[in-house]
Image (cartoon, rainbow, N blue to C red):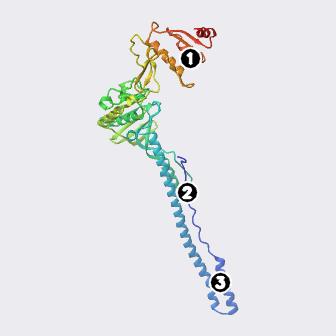
Amino acid sequence: MESTTIVLPAAPAPASRPSLPLLAAVVPVIAGVVLWAVTGSLFALCFAALGPLMLLASFLDGLRTRRRDRRRIAAESDAAWDRAGAELTALHADERAGLWRRHPDAAACMAEQPLRGHEPPSADTALVLGHGERASAVRASGGDDDRSRAFRERAAVLDDAPVVVPIGGGVCVRAPEPVATAVLRALVVQLCRRFAPMQVAIVGDRLEELGLAGFPHASAVRRAAFRLVVGTWADGSGDARLLLAGPGEEPPDGVTAVLDCTEPARARLRTPEGVQDLTVEGLSLAQARAIAADGAARGEERSEVPTRIALHELDAPLSDGLGLAAVIGRGERGDVVVDLVEDGPHAIVTGMTGTGKSELLVTWVTAMATAHGPDRVHFVLADFKGGTAFDPLRELPQVAAVITDLDDDGARRGCRA
């Protein structure tokens, strides 16, 4: 939003009291008395009576003008407050829409697939627990009357907004079994739609029972960078937990958010910051399985490249005793195997400075050394770009020599060879 501050209308100034034209009223009286004294005519005294009549007429006209000014000022004030109210409604709508774009729940994720970044979730990643009130960024300034104070209180609260908690603190859904499992499914589906299987894995001994075993995330335990434990505290270790508990049960230690579902769509959230009522989502077993099947049908598990992977997580290729096959990474369709004998015998790695050429060569040599012993392969490593890229490989038994530009004699021998 370009501006989140609303300037409130100033309190209307009261309409001025009508003034009495005393001088204008006195002049006709004096003139009438003078004329009577000069002419002796009683009709001159009638002229003197015009003074009080003018005074009364002027006073009545002032009252009429004051009432008209009061109505005009009140109308202008109401119009200004209406404009402030319309501005507040528009700012709240924009803020609410922005929050829902940044923090979609399961329904929003199903209506439109969220954009997935390359980073996996972390302990601070926001998990949407439901709809409710939250503090608004909109502020109102000016005014010190009751109407202004009520407007500022209204501006400070945004309703029907996503209520979020950091996922790393853990969430315990406490309710009767059918309600608790429905709410838990919606939370898991939300995360599965927001993050790829290579980013987050779901683990637990009740995934099949909950209808979550069909998600590709349930089979990405080895590859995913973030593990989400679903079900009970004893389901295994992970980076975050979504747990179930029956009514009246104490939440496990370490959980910082408890959802007490009082009815299918209503819940009370308890966190260290306080207690709040909100509206929650729920998914049936059939709905969860249908969403999982849709993800599997779209080939979701195979369509993502992991952001990072360790060498020990790759499956070593079976050696046929002929080539030098080695697994150097994982792509969209699984592990990437390169055989320097069958695919080579020469290879070149290109790229701009800082894109990881040296790291790829170190990985490739390490992978070949892991898959093939010193009786199958020896390496002579030459580094003329600083002399330290291959230092981690010096201790490998397959490495016969490391030639660098820092070793003049070795460099000359390597060039002659």
- Label 1: few (<14), some (14–19) or many (≥20) C-alpha neighbours in 10 Å: some
Q: Position of residue 361 (x, y in %)?
A: 51, 18
N-terminal label among 3 and 1 = 3
Where does residue 34 sit, x and y in percent of width and height?
69, 87
Q: Is residue 95 above or below residue 346?
A: below
Check residue 69 in the rendering and tell me which mark sits there, or answer none. none
Query: In terms of depth relative to the viewer, which is nearer, 224 or 341?
Result: 341
Mark 1, secondary structure of its residue: loop
Crowd rating for badge 3 (residues with CA inside 10 Å; few <14, some 14–19, many 20+): many
Q: Which residue is mark 2?
A: 9
First-in-chain label (2 vs 3): 2
Q: Residue furthest bottom?
A: 40
Asked if labels 2 and 1 touch by Cβ distance under 8 angstroms, the answer is: no
Number of the front mark, 1 or 2:
1
Say which residue appears at 46% left-offset and 46% top-offset.
158
Q: Which residue is mark 3?
A: 29
- The amino acid pointed to by label 3 is Val
- Height in image: 168 above or below 29? above
Q: Amino acid at mark 1?
A: Ala
Q: How many marks?
A: 3
Give the mark toward the camera: 3 or 1.
1
| Residue 360 locus on image (x, y percent) | 50, 20
Residue 389 is tagged as 1
Amino acid marked by disc 2: Pro
Under tag 3, what secondary structure?
Answer: helix
Observer-nearest of 6 and 414: 414
**Side of 3 where 22 appears, left or right:** right
Query: Residue 416: percent from the left, percent from the top?
Result: 60, 8
Q: In the picture provided, is 69 more to the left or to the right than 369?
A: right
Residue plotted at (58% across, 73% down): 62
The Cα–Cα distance between marks 3 and 1, rounded to whole angstroms, is 114 Å
Q: Nearer the viewer, mark 2 or mark 3?
A: 2
